[in-house]
Image (cartoon, grey):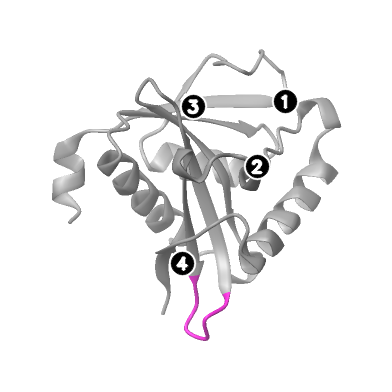
């Protein structure tokens, strides 16, 4: 049994998950292709963060959206501990984050992921994200894949 709860990048469980994600991505990509944003350094009102919590209360996954003033947001730091994968936690986490973004009047989500993270690309594609070109502040990078999804209120109401 898992629950999805609002969280903060400063919580120890979230920091541990992000450290594991950073270590993983650092092995896959050179520094110039790693976009390891420190969410704790951003104003809290501009970040939506959720944690996946298991039955014993441990945080086993996380994800965030950084909101922009123009109604867009960027999906960041989506990670499920390897021991808890294969249970559609990624899909459920994205759904929770997207619903929270809609409540904050975010209409479009974008993301950058790496070409070596094909499981992540498959997850985002299953969840309705489509490939697009680079968006600010990124430049085109042969090791990056950029994706986008338009959020609609109908979808939000259907999942409540």
Magenta-highlighted residues: 53-58
Q: Is mark 1 on a helix, strand or loop?
A: loop
Mark 1 vs 4, N-terminal side: 4
Label 4 and label 2: CA atoms lie apart by: 31 Å
- The quadrant holding residue 27 is top right
Q: Residue 147 got which mark? A: 3
| Residue at 62% from the left image edge and 44% from the top image edge | 39
Residue carrying label 1: 143
Residue 56 lies left or right of residue 71; in this view the side is: right
Mark found first going from the N terminus, 4 or 2? 2
Q: Give the quarter of the image for residue 5.
A: bottom left
- Which residue is disc 4 drawn over? 87
Front disc: 2 or 1? 2
Q: Which quadrant holds the C terminus?
A: bottom left
62 or 67, which lies in front? Answer: 67
Q: Is residue 30 magenta?
A: no
The residues tagged by marks 1 and 4 sit, at their Cα atoms, a distance apart of 28 Å
Of residues 122 and 50, the one drawn nearer to the viewer in this rendering = 50
Local secondary structure at mark 3: strand
Q: Residue 149: percent from the left, percent from the top?
A: 37, 29
- Earlier-in-chain disc, 4 versus 3: 4
Q: Which of marks 2 and 3 is nearer the N terminus?
A: 2
User: How far is the residue under mark 2 from the one under mark 3?
Assistant: 24 Å
Name the residue rendered at 46%, 67% in the picture. 87
Q: Main secondary structure of the magenta part?
A: loop
Residue in the picture at 38% in, 42% down: 127
**Residue in view at x 67 percent, y 38 percent:** 37
Tag shown at residue 41: 2
- Which circle, 2 or 3, is nearer the viewer? 2
Q: Is residue 94 above or below residue 105?
A: below
Q: In this view, does 53 lie to the left or right of 159?
A: right
């Amino acid at each position: 049994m898992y629950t999805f709860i609002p969280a903060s990048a400063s919580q120890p469980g979230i920091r541990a998950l992000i450290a594991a994600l950073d270590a993983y991505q650092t092995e896959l990509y050179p520094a110039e292709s790693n976009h390891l944003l420190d969410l704790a350094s951003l104003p809290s009102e501009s970040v939506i963060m959720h944690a996946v919590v298991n039955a014993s209360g441990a945080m086993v996954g996380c994800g965030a959206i950084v909101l922009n003033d123009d109604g867009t947001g960027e999906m960041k730091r989506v990670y499920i501990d390897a021991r808890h994968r294969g249970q559609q936690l990624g899909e459920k986490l994205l759904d929770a984050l997207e619903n929270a973004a809609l409540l904050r009047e975010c209409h479009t989500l974008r993301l950058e992921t790496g070409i070596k993270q094909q499981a992540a690309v498959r997850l985002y594609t299953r969840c309705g994200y489509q490939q697009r070109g680079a968006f600010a502040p990124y430049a085109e990078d042969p090791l990056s894949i950029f994706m986008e999804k338009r959020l609609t209120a109908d979808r939000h109401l259907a999942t409540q």
